[in-house]
Image (tube, helix red, strand yellow):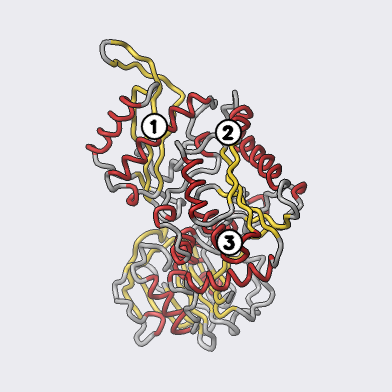
Amino acid sequence: MQHNVLILDFGSQYTQLIARRVRELNIFCEIFPYNHYPTDLSSYKAVILGGSPYSVRSEDALQIDLSEIRGKLPLLAVCYGAQYLAHFSGGEVAASNIREYGRANLSYIKEDEVFFENVNLNSQVWMSHSDTIKHLPTNGVKLASTNDVENAAYKIEGETTYAIQFHPEVYHSTNGKQMLENFLVKIAEVPQNFTPNAFVEDCVKELQEKVGNDKVVLGLSGGVDSTVAAVLLNKAIGKNLYCIFVNNGLLRKNEFENVLHQYKDMGLNVKGVDASARFLEALAGVDDPETKRKIIGNAFIEVFDDEAHKIEDVTWLAQGTIYPDVIESVSVKGPSATIKSHHNVGGLPDFMKLKIVEPLRMLFKDEVRRVGATLGIDPELLGRHPFPGPGLSIRILGDITPEKVRILQEVDAVFINGLKEHGLYDKVWQAGAILLPVNSVGVMGDERTYEKVVALRAVESTDGMTADWVHLPYEFLMKISNEIINKVKGVNRVVYDISSKPPATIEWE
């Protein structure tokens, strides 16, 4: 696979967005920490320096040796990167009199400048910095300004080096994608050859070379990532792929049977293992969400390991790891600052003694879906909402019992089926129900009830990093509430969660 574009991460919340915008141009790119990137840059066609929460003027400013990049590869420096080039190359960066954050408009654009082709004067850009560039670096030429920021964009003569003090990757920069295209395609001449078809072709070839005639075992979850990984591997190695689908007792209603049937129709070699009693027994009496996750993770590994040992001479473990998992497990400032250690990254117990193969580890979720469509996977499966690895355990607040699981499965089925029947499912990124650890008074017929409360949750998002609650029609919510209370024994009250992320999270635990 061609590397093409190297993105260096200085800790900005927007770094993944840069990569997503570059990928949308059918250009392959990779993100690396600014202090830990490949020494061999021969396969890269361009480099992008990302933003950072740090100031170039502070003692703990993140510094990088650019001697193998500047003047040798086309370079685009964004926000912190632009200020870094100025501060350490003969210019001046100072604290801004006002915090330059939010929408701004380009009040000046240098004429006949390729970087700003098809970008109109007064185009909106998004600022996010408290420092500003007072004087350009040596050989710097101003390319654009806003009303408050004189040096909003510049280039360095004698190099293919460009710098901007705003974020082209965010939605609020209306011509941001055009600027990235101008830099990468017109200036750096990076090929636009990263397509789903090309990925499938390259990936199958790489898997065949890497795995050969070895046997591979893969844990299927019913979700998009593991399914696409399985179909890719099946295309590459056929009968040598062994899939295991474990029922942990915390799946949606009838999901174990339905998904197994769907997988077998796809020609995959799948074994279903019903270990629900084992998981529920291990969870009995546990109400701490992090402890629940650890118990489920450990139980899954034990069950999966038992089943894997029944297959002779297995060499590889396949995982549905995707690129955000990889990025979030690598820290800019070392292990102490890691955002999270993802369950698919580096989490394999030593005793399993298997090598890892991760065919999707360089793809974002939307790219996984496009690859799945290229492979001919059922659109309904590819369009499935994300579902948490620990399943319904983190949607049951408090301890887990078989009765609570039954109640939540029934409620979830009414809600999800209702979304589908009313044409709302595909307008929602993720939906589910939460069983609250409280009872409420109600009246059914002429009798007083004291039963469970459930919360419904539906959000819209592109990647799960941020999310807004969905304004579902009142008539729909009324119908679903009535149906849940009438059909699900043990529930007498339904509420709807109208919290966005941030400050709330999508899941309650």
The image's mark for residue 334 is: none
Q: Residues within 10 Å of mark 1 (few under 14, many from 20)?
A: many
The reply to whether residue 427 is visible in this rendering is yes
Q: Earlier in the sequence, mark 2 or mark 1?
A: 2
Q: Circle 2 is placed at which residue position?
A: 276
Q: Residues within 10 Å of mark 2 (few under 14, many from 20)?
A: some
Q: Circle 1 is placed at which residue position?
A: 411
**Which kind of residue does numbered mark 3 sit on?**
Asn
Q: Residue at x 33, y 26 (%)?
A: 487
**Local SS, label 1:** helix
Q: Is residue 211 left or right of residue 422?
A: right
Q: Is residue 76 left or right of residue 314?
A: left
Q: Label 1 near label 2: C-beta < 8 Å?
A: no
Question: Is 358 drawn above or below residue 118 in the view shown?
Answer: above
* Quarter occupied by the N terminus: bottom right
Instruction: Find residue 107 and report its horizontal and vertical position in percent.
Output: 31, 74
Q: Earlier in the sequence, mark 1 or mark 3?
A: 3
Cα distance between the residues tagged 1 and 3: 36 Å
**Which kind of residue does numbered mark 1 sit on?**
Val
Q: Earlier in the sequence, mark 3 or mark 2?
A: 3
Cα distance between the residues tagged 3 and 2: 28 Å
The reply to whether residue 56 is visible in this rendering is no
**Local SS, label 2:** helix
**Which kind of residue does numbered mark 2 sit on?**
Ser
Q: Circle 3 is placed at which residue position?
A: 234
Place residue 201 in its image quadrant. Answer: bottom right
Instruction: Find residue 194 and report its horizontal and vertical position in percent.
Output: 49, 74
Instruction: Find residue 223 and report its horizontal and vertical position in percent.
Output: 50, 50
Q: Label 2 near label 3: C-beta < 8 Å?
A: no
Q: Quick one: 159 or 84, which is closer to the camera?
A: 159
Q: Of the residues tagged 3 and 2, which is closer to the observer?
A: 3
